[in-house]
Image (tube, helix red, strand yellow):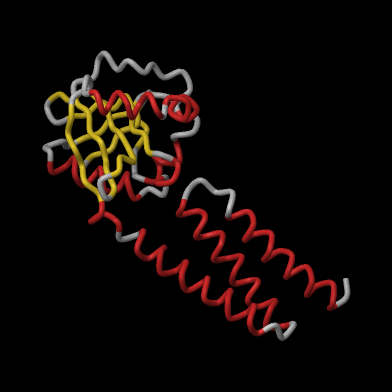
Amino acid sequence: MNTHMLIEAVGYLGSLLVLVSMLMTSVYKLRVINTIGSCIFTVYALIIHSYPTALMNFCLVLINLRFLWKMNRMDKDFDLVKTRKGDAFLRYFIDSRRDDIRACFPGIPLDFSDATDAYIVCCKGLPVGVTIGEEQDGVLNLVLDYTIPEYRDFSVGRFLVSELKKQGVRKLCYGGPVEFHLPYLQKLGYVKNGELYEKEL
């Protein structure tokens, strides 16, 4: 491979990553991949002396980094609303996200008949996650801990853990489907104990 082809490959790689980032449902992943693509494309533009293109991509990198920094500090933008399992808005939220919930938690029943506690996580007034479970003596047995795709960057989970501790919850237990949920549990520090995943708060 000669130098010209190598330089062109760098340009194509940067372009591909920028395009792929637009397919991400998670805003966090979009920003991360777009930043990497823009960095590569900035280098490519400098090599071929296309300074306007380099400047534009460098600015995109700075914009993405600013938003990523803000997203990592988003706890202050979240609110935790305690509700009941029969609450009309909670039911609406679950029904409107039914297909995605079932995709994330295959085989999960959506009636939650055994649950006693329900929480909705809102970001600037908009519902972005829901947690449902049964609490006994400070132990919350989770039957659902769901976040919409745009906010699956673990910031909701970190916020939820800190707020549930303030609500008197000292331990979280989860025994539902983990096929797609396991990375989330591991990231938040859940430990496998038999058939359950547990986290001390």
In depth, the one of 56 and 13 nearer the eye is 56
The quarter of the picture where the N terminus appears is: bottom right
Find residue 189 and report its horizontal and vertical position in percent. 34, 44
- Residue 129 falls left or right of residue 104: left
Task: Name the residue located 50 percent from the left edge and 60 percent from the top edge.
Answer: 31
- Residue 90 falls left or right of residue 62: left
Q: Residue furthest right?
A: 2
- Residue 25 falls left or right of residue 195: right
Res. 39 image quadrant: bottom right
Find residue 8 and report its horizontal and vertical position in percent. 79, 71
The quarter of the picture where the C terminus appears is: top left
Q: Is residue 45 above or below residue 159?
A: below
Number of marks drawn: 0
Res. 161 image quadrant: top left
In depth, the one of 83 and 40 nearer the eye is 83
In depth, the one of 32 and 56 nearer the eye is 56
Find residue 11 and report its horizontal and vertical position in percent. 73, 70
Task: Name the residue located 56 percent from the left edge and 62 percent from the top edge.
Answer: 34
Find residue 7 and report its horizontal and vertical position in percent. 78, 75
Q: Is residue 126 above or below residue 103?
A: below
Task: Name the residue located 19 percent from the left edge and 21 percent from the top edge.
Answer: 116
- Residue 11 falls left or right of residue 144: right
Task: Name the residue located 27 percent from the left edge and 41 percent from the top edge.
Answer: 121
